[in-house]
Image (spheres, rainbow, N blue to C red):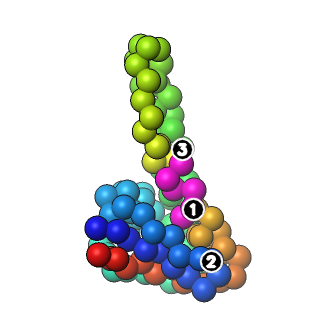
């Protein structure tokens, strides 16, 4: 499943379903697709997302320190995957617009 986030102030953002659902849950949403945040709810959703991403970063840093330096991984972190969505949310806040998401199978 692919999930596409959209609003009138920003281009659409499409991401893998599992990543999108995790980010929606970080924002305090149930994770159901399709769905939406009203414009007045976007600032709180963004604040929750940024707080959760910071916790994920801290956890990842402590795990990296415990792993051997020879073990290289090339995973794209959840914090990096969230950046386009964070930009979309900031645009929605700036222009006071709602954010919607749908399943793009």
Crowd around label 1: few <14 · some 14–19 · many ≥20 (10 Å): some
According to the image, label 3 marks what residue?
A: 54
State which tag comes first along the sequence, 1 or 3.
Answer: 3
Q: Earlier in the sequence, mark 1 or mark 2?
A: 2
Q: Which mark is residue 10?
A: 2
**Residue 48, above or below 104:** above
In the image, what residue occupies the spot 51% across and 70% down? 13
Q: Which residues are magenta?
A: 80-85
Q: In the picture, residue 17 is in which quadrant?
A: bottom left
> Where residue 6 sits in the image (x, y, percent)?
51, 79
Quarter location, residue 103:
bottom left
Give the residue displayed 51% in from the left and 83% down from the top.
Answer: 38
Sequence-wise first label, 3 or 2: 2
Tag 1–tag 3 contact (CB < 8 Å): no
**Secondary structure beneath label 3:** helix
Q: Which mark is residue 84?
A: 1
Q: Quadrant of the C terminus?
A: bottom left
């Amino acid at each position: 499943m692919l999930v596409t986030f959209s609003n009138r102030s920003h281009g659409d953002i499409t991401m893998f379903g599992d990543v999108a659902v995790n980010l929606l849950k970080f924002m305090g949403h149930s994770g159901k697709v399709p769905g939406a945040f009203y414009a007045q709810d976007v600032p709180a959703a963004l604040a929750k997302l940024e707080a959760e991403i910071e916790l994920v970063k801290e956890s990842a840093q402590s795990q990296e320190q415990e792993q051997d330096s020879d073990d290289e991984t090339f995973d794209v972190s959840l914090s990096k995957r969230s950046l386009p969505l964070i930009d979309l949310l900031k645009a929605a806040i700036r222009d006071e617009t709602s954010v919607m998401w749908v399943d793009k199978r």
